[in-house]
Structures are given as structure tokens and as C-alpha cells.
Image (spheres, rainbow, N blue to C red):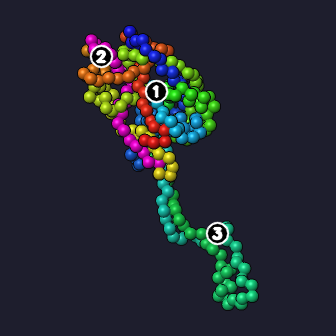
Amino acid sequence: MSTPTGTPKRVAKVTIEAPVVSFRYPHFLIGQQPSFDVPPPSTIFGHVASALGEWPTEPLHFAYAFTAHGRGSDLEHQHIISRAPGKLPEPIVDPLWKPEEPPPGKKLTKKQLAALNTPRLLERTTEGTVQPHKRDFLFDVRLELYLDPPELAEAFRSPVFTVVLGRSQDLACVRRVEVVDLLPATQGYLERTIIPGSMRPRLPWGMTTLMPRYIGPAPERQPVFESYIVLRERVYVGYPERTQARQLLTFAGAEDTWWTDPATTEDRGGKRLLYFHTLEGGAS
């Protein structure tokens, strides 16, 4: 059996859908901007913070399955702002300028009076340019997000800020919020998710991707990156006799903690497995 006897794990399960999202590779600044196939951990952390209305202060444990039914690219304008001191092409009077009143009892020269009545002109401090570039988008997406502690379910029933998935313009919708009991498992399958890059020696499938794990608070917004394995197709766990299947290899001394959602589809006697990642609240 894929679900041996053990203590269930109670978590919040939040189902989110969006018509379009884009999880940009942060190291691409010009030209085409590709998108991750799945949301990076920093996006999940920000998504939870948006629902709470504040930075999570307790450790956040999460797992997810993410589906996108389409992928494409389109032109998007990139607004580049840079420092540019100097004069404007045409003189513009500062709208906040007012003529100064001469000091009482003091006689001023014509030059001094002229200086008091000379309008103050605006100076150029920045300039902006618009540069078109291609950006990748994912369409018709669905995120099944599992969160521990389960009390986070209440935040998604009445989120503080507008529900988005990634960028502020990518509006999303919380379709369902529930509290479920996950069961410990030794067999099952992984799909449409991420697992730590440290498992790469045991897994010849999936794509190793450097993702932002955490982005600190403003103004520094210091990012922390980590390697993950992105799994789109199914990979099986706990079937050593199935040598032809895509499966996670078993090494001596390797111990994994897997959880399964009883509501998921069964395949080869097991159900979808979940690996929980941990992000420390307010720290990397």
C-alpha cells in the first residue's frame, strides 16, 4: 500500500486559478524574458504574505502542484528609468514657485529685486525610455497549494490584498479553500511540482533550475537563490521493481518524507506525492 499507517498531517489546501501568469527569470534583463514553468518559492511566499496582509513571521511549509494549459510569448514594453541631471529641452517654470517678498525695512538693488522675481525653472533629474521586448506567458493555470500551518486557510477565505499570482497585473481567483488531512506514503508519483536540487543524483528526470527561494523586504529586497528540480511529467517513487519507469532512485541511507492527498488520482497503486519545502518567516 502507498499509505501506511501513520499520523495524518493536517494542512490548508488552496486552489487558485488565473488566465495568464509569467514567472520571469530574474537574470534576463533585455531581449526575450522567459518564464519559469512553475512558480518559484519566492512567489509562493509573496502570495501567502499578500493574503495575510503582512510578512509571515512563522516558518512556512508548502507543497504544490501547478498546471498550465498553454504557453506563448508577446511583445511587452519595458520602461527603463535612469538618472539624467541637466536642463530640460525647453524651460518650464516650477509650478510650486512663488515670488519672494523682500525683507521688511531693507532696501534692495534692482539686481536683487530681479532675482526675487525670477521664476525658478524645473531641472531634469531622470529620463525614461520605452523598449519593446518579448515575454513568455503561461495561460489557463491552476495551482493546488498545500500550506502548513492549516490556520492559513482563513487568510485565503478573506485575503487582505488583491489576489494575484506573480506580477501585480496577473489577477487570480481563489476557487476553493479547505483543510485536509494528508497521509504518510512510501509509494506514489510526483508531477507538476518542484523538489530540492540535492536530489539530482537520484533523479535522471526533470530540469535543474536556479530559482529565487526568498526575496527580502524593501527597500533592499535582497534575493536568495537555490537549485530545484522542476518536474512536469510523472516520476514514480517507491517502485524498485519497475526498472523501465521514470522513477526516483533509491540509495542506501536516503530517507524521504512523503505525503499524499487521498483525493488525487491513483496510478500503479499510489497517489500523488507531496514534498514540503520550508521557508523561515522573515528570514532566508
Q: Is residue 83 magenta?
A: no
| In this rendering, position of residue 120 left or right of residue 208 | right
Residue 169 in view in this figure: no
Disc 1 is placed on an element classified as strand
From the viewer's perspective, tell me whether residue 200 is left or right of residue 111.
left
Instruction: Give the position of the C terminus as an image quadrant.
Output: top left
**Residue at the extreme right of the image, as rendered:** 105
At label 2, the amino acid type is Ala
Give residue 88's position: percent from left, percent from top.
55, 69
Kindly identify which numbered label has been placed on residue 224: none
Few, some or many residues within 10 Å of mark 2 (<14, 14–19, 20+)? few
Disc 3 marks which residue? Answer: 94
Between 78 and 240, the residue placed more toward the observer is: 240
Q: Residue 110, image x and y in percent?
A: 68, 89
- The residue that label 1 is drawn on is 64
Asked if 30 appears above or below 187 in the picture, the reply is: below
Q: Residue at x 35, y 20 (%)?
A: 235
Q: Earlier in the sequence, mark 3 or mark 1?
A: 1
Q: Residue at x 26, y 23 (%)?
A: 253
The N terminus: image quadrant:
top left
Q: CA distance from mark 2 to mark 3?
A: 72 Å
In primary-sequence order, the first of circles 2 and 1 is 1
List the residue tagged with mark 2: 245
Callout 3: SS: loop
Q: Vertical placement of 143 versus 2: above or below?
A: below
Magenta part of the chain: 221-242
